[in-house]
Image: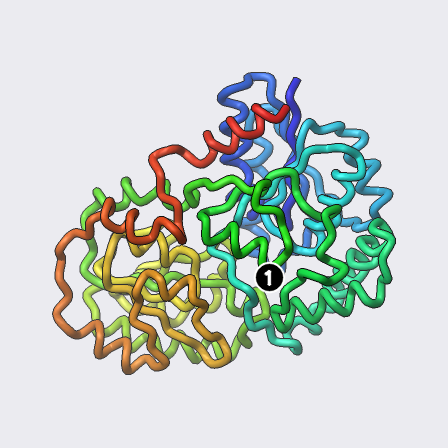
Amino acid sequence: MLKGLFYDSSATMLLKNHSPISNIFSSKNSNFKSVFVSNETSSNLDSEHNYLCERNLLKLNNSSYFKLKTFNHKKISKFLEDFDPDFVFIGGYRIYDQLITAICNINNIKIYKIQHGFEIDTVNYRLRSVLFKTVKVLRILNCSYNLALISKSSPFQLTLQYVNYFFNGISLKNTLLDNVLFHPTILFVYSEYYKDFWFNKFGLIKENMCNITPPDFLMVDKVSTQKQQQGCCYIAQTLVEDGRMSENEFRDLLTEYESIAKCVEVFIIKLHPRSELKYYENISKLKNVKITNDFPNCTSYLTHYSSLLYTAAFLSEYLILHELKSHKTHEIFKKVNPLIVNSTKEIITFLTKKISNEKISINKRKKELKYFADFENINPYEQVYNTIISLN
């Protein structure tokens, strides 16, 4: 029996990022067994939605679900020993991903990472917001300590370098976190650009990377056939939930966005899986505002630095990046040629101009963006499956 273990920060993220991989293995191997493991580090989760995600994970074929809150490397090793997986999957390269990767490498367990979104060097976390999450901070420090122990490094120096990386986005090359022990067996990335990105940022070996189509692109063909809605879609992000913006600042931003909603036929808010609905209560009272978890086909799209901007680029040429204070636009998002603005007034001016309904050429866009986003006709999960099977 083939067994896979999927590790992430919550049931919400496990269902979104890992269940499609589990499903493709189950469809190819009827006896495939999967265990989903949450380390419970996600902040500001919608508890009801997360509970539903837990239930949905357990509905999958031959699946089990566990909460493993410990970052004690001996306890994690024991958990892995008891389950005895053929492989482990992680969805990021956070410090706890590096810890379980190191443990897997020491125990000769193949471990794979699939890129999660169009990652950038750093995001602007607010020190005050992060420090308020006392329990999480203490758990991450404990994780850092265990990572130092298992790699026989200085806990103080490793933690200091990690904190500097977290807040300032320094490269981890030539630091204690640049350690082949922390490298996954294979890293599934979105493009040649990201091979360079992961090498330059973490020192990961390019030969151990495999290009796949970003999973979000799977929805492009279906969404493009839907009737285009004459209006603007705001692609929400976890700005408050992740400590990048204060709650009051975000509420003020959405109050400003009410004026944007009033100048278009329809204003659709595409939620993030971890979005807190309470922040959208006031703007949702406007008659032409719709809130959805589905990605809509719109004439224009508005966001800050969401990975879904690349999906939107295959549906419309009218892309707006609202650059928030201290949140500079990363070069990767400039490649889709968005209008970069700093105020709501600029957004309204742009949206009130005549916008063409002409359909974008998906094939042309594929060629233009190939170096940054490898959009092929191969299902990325099929490619992941074929690669892993060839190594087992």
Left of 66 or right of it: where is 240?
left
Q: Residue 237's spot in the image, x, y percent?
A: 46, 63
Q: In which quadrant of the rendered view does residue 344 lie?
A: bottom left
In the picture, measured across the screen, residue 275 lies left or right of residue 8, that is left
Residue assigned mark 1 = 44
Give the image location of residue 311, x and y in percent: 35, 52
Residue count near mark 1 (Cα–Cα under 10 Å), binned few <14, some 14–19, many ≥20: some
Q: Is residue 72 left or right of residue 112?
A: right
Which residue is found at the position 30% from the left and 65% from the top? 337
Quadrant of residue 78 within the rendered picture = top right
Residue 201: quadrant of the picture: bottom right
Q: In this rendering, would 281 be left or right of 35? A: left
148 or 135, which lies in front? 148
Q: Is residue 281 above or below residue 109?
A: below
Give the mark count: 1
SS for callout 1: loop
Disc 1 marks a residue whose amino acid type is: Asn
Looking at the picture, the colour scheme in use is rainbow
Residue 53 in sight: no
Residue depicted at 23% across the width and 49% down the height: 364
Q: Residue at x 36, y 55 (%)?
A: 310
